[in-house]
């Protein structure tokens, strides 16, 4: 071998080692990303060099060093200052990898099924109200960024997934969850900081698909079959099976650092309402543990009114009831009501702005401490029956119920025969609604929007809809 050939071989060999040694990052640590401000943010990846990994964010002169463990995996946390940017972050084990155009701000994790998945451009023949203006007005200069995780099922927890951060362009906004994006718009406008959305969703999926095997085995072992996780090959429609979406679309993200969680799911569990009252708190506890974020706020959306197989069945009513029940079981949570914004003919209502705004109102008031509105829905407190009418008392803030002086629909009354008839409600005073129906001279039970399809008409003074309710505790009879 000549000296020239030897030198060339040596250079090529060094290049090969360096290329192999380059730090590898998860796909969602990418250009354009948003990191949670004023937090100890988690970073991780792999290196084949065996050398320490140095991380150098441009918002500080300090460098952070991670010692690779078995398999070259490394992990560290880096404190972030207040919102700002753009910044760059350089990762090096001898060869540098840099991500740029990084912002610091508020990051929210968004998940669920099709009503979370529904993009700003809508589904075929199912539009999002106001989408054209939002899409065409999107500008990269507005600091909203989105990362939607690629759909993936797995029998075991994966370490990698697809998905990278996108700037606020019309093309990207059109493909982004409409409910999540409207939330981000309101949050960014009010807080005046960058907002990042980490989105992992899949239409037509039950909550148990998003939960890890350990939680299901511990708390729901007798209720779910997990044999598919050991079968070697996942079955058709694996996304409907327990743990498959956790393994493919949640596990690879942990423990990414975010401020809080948004959740729009439930339609796939609506016929198992009582079980859901246990599943949702277990899901939240699991997520807070997996992402090492025990105080993370959790804001979720009430499933929308829809006709389903019969508009008068009460399947939705019982599910609404169990969703509300979880509020008392999940610390630091809130529910965005939707009793007034369903659509009779589609399970995917077009009014996603109201959903995003109501989630944002909860976050702005409960998480960020901004005063001035009553963000939580009025809820049932008690009822008194006298003189052929029901006087319903609601839990509501100081500004009271609305609208006054109008006949309100969505109410029903029943007598001892347990047969419900449509009734009319009228707001009286700050907290009461007087409900009456000519067919029920001696009512003993009152319900509000407690069936698959009804249109809510009762609000607080800020336009936040009242939650569906029933005063009776009659047996679960779906008729």
Image (cartoon, rainbow, N blue to C red):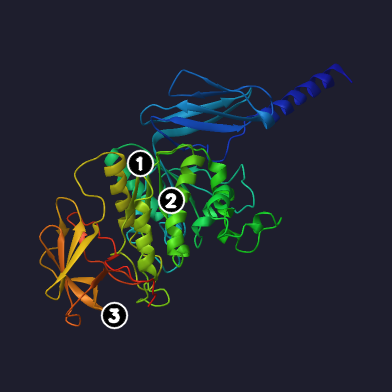
* For discs 3 and 2, the disc positioned in front in the rendered view: 3
**Residue sitting at 18 percent across and 78 percent down?**
442
State the separation of the CA atoms marked 3 and 1. 54 Å
Q: Secondary structure at mark 1?
A: loop
- How crowded pointer 1 is (Cα within 10 Å; few <14, some 14-19, many 20+) is rated as some
* For discs 1 and 2, the disc positioned in front in the rendered view: 2
Q: Position of residue 108 (x, y in %)?
A: 41, 43
- Residue 59 visible, this angle: yes
- Dividing the picture into quadrants, the one containing residue 229 is bottom right
- Dividing the picture into quadrants, the one containing residue 417 is bottom left
**Residue sitting at 44 percent across and 21 percent down?**
60
Q: Earlier in the sequence, mark 3 or mark 1?
A: 1
Q: Secondary structure at mark 3?
A: loop
In front of the other: 456 or 219: 219
Q: Secondary structure at mark 2?
A: helix
Q: Position of residue 72 (x, y in %)?
A: 66, 30
- Residue 150 visible, this angle: no
State the separation of the CA atoms marked 1 and 2. 35 Å
Instruction: Say which mark, if any, is on residue 419.
Output: 3
Q: Position of residue 218 (x, y in %)?
A: 56, 50
Q: Quadrant of the N terminus?
A: top right
State the separation of the CA atoms marked 3 and 2. 34 Å
Residue at the spot of label 1: 142
Q: Residue furthest bottom?
A: 439
Q: Residue furthest front?
A: 416
Against 130, residue 56 (above or below) is above
Residue contact at pointers 3 and 1, CB within 8 angstroms: no
Instruction: Say which mark, if any, is on residue 281.
Output: 2
């Amino acid at each position: 071998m000549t000296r020239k050939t030897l030198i060339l071989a040596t250079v090529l060999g060094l290049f090969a080692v360096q290329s192999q040694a380059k730090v590898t990052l998860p796909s969602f640590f990418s250009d354009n990303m948003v990191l949670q401000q004023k937090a100890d943010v988690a970073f991780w990846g792999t290196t084949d060099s065996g050398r320490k990994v140095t991380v150098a964010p441009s918002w500080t002169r300090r460098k952070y060093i991670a010692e690779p463990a078995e398999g070259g995996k490394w992990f560290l946390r880096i404190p972030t200052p207040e919102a700002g940017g753009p910044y760059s972050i350089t990762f090096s084990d001898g060869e540098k990898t840099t991500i740029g155009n990084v912002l610091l701000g508020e990051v929210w994790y968004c998940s669920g099924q099709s009503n979370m998945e529904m993009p700003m451009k809508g589904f075929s023949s199912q539009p999002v109200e106001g989408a054209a203006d939002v899409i065409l007005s999107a500008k990269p200069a507005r600091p909203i960024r989105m990362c939607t995780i690629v759909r993936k099922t797995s029998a075991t927890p994966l370490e990698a997934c697809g998905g990278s951060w996108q700037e606020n362009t019309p093309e990207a906004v059109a493909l982004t969850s409409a409910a999540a994006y409207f939330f981000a718009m309101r949050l960014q406008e009010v807080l005046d900081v960058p907002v990042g959305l980490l989105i992992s969703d899949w239409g037509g999926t039950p909550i148990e698909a998003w939960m890890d095997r350990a939680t299901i085995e511990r708390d729901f072992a007798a209720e779910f079959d997990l044999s598919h996780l050991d079968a070697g090959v996942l079955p058709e429609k694996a996304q409907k099976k327990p743990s498959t979406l956790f393994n493919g679309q949640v596990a690879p993200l942990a423990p990414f650092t975010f401020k809080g969680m948004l959740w729009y799911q439930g339609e796939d569990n609506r016929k198992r309402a009582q079980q859901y009252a246990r599943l949702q708190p277990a899901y939240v506890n699991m997520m807070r543990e997996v992402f090492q974020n025990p105080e993370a706020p959790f804001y979720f959306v009430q499933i929308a009114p829809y006709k389903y197989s019969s508009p008068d069945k009460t399947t939705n009513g019982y599910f609404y009831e169990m969703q509300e029940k979880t509020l008392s079981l999940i610390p630091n949570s809130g529910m965005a009501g939707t009793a007034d914004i369903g659509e009779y003919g589609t399970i995917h209502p077009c009014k996603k702005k109201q959903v995003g705004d109501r989630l944002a109102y909860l976050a702005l008031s409960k998480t960020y401490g901004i005063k001035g509105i009553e963000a939580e829905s009025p809820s049932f407190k008690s009822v008194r029956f006298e003189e052929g009418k029901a006087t319903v008392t609601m839990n509501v803030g100081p500004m009271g119920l609305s609208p006054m002086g109008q006949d309100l629909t969505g109410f029903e009354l029943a007598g001892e025969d347990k047969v419900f008839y449509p009734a009319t409600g009228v707001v009286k005073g700050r907290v009461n609604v007087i409900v009456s129906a000519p067919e029920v001279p001696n009512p003993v039970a009152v319900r509000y929007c407690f069936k698959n399809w009804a249109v809510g008409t009762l609000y607080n003074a800020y336009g936040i809809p009242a939650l569906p309710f029933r005063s009776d505790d009659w047996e679960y009879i779906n008729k």
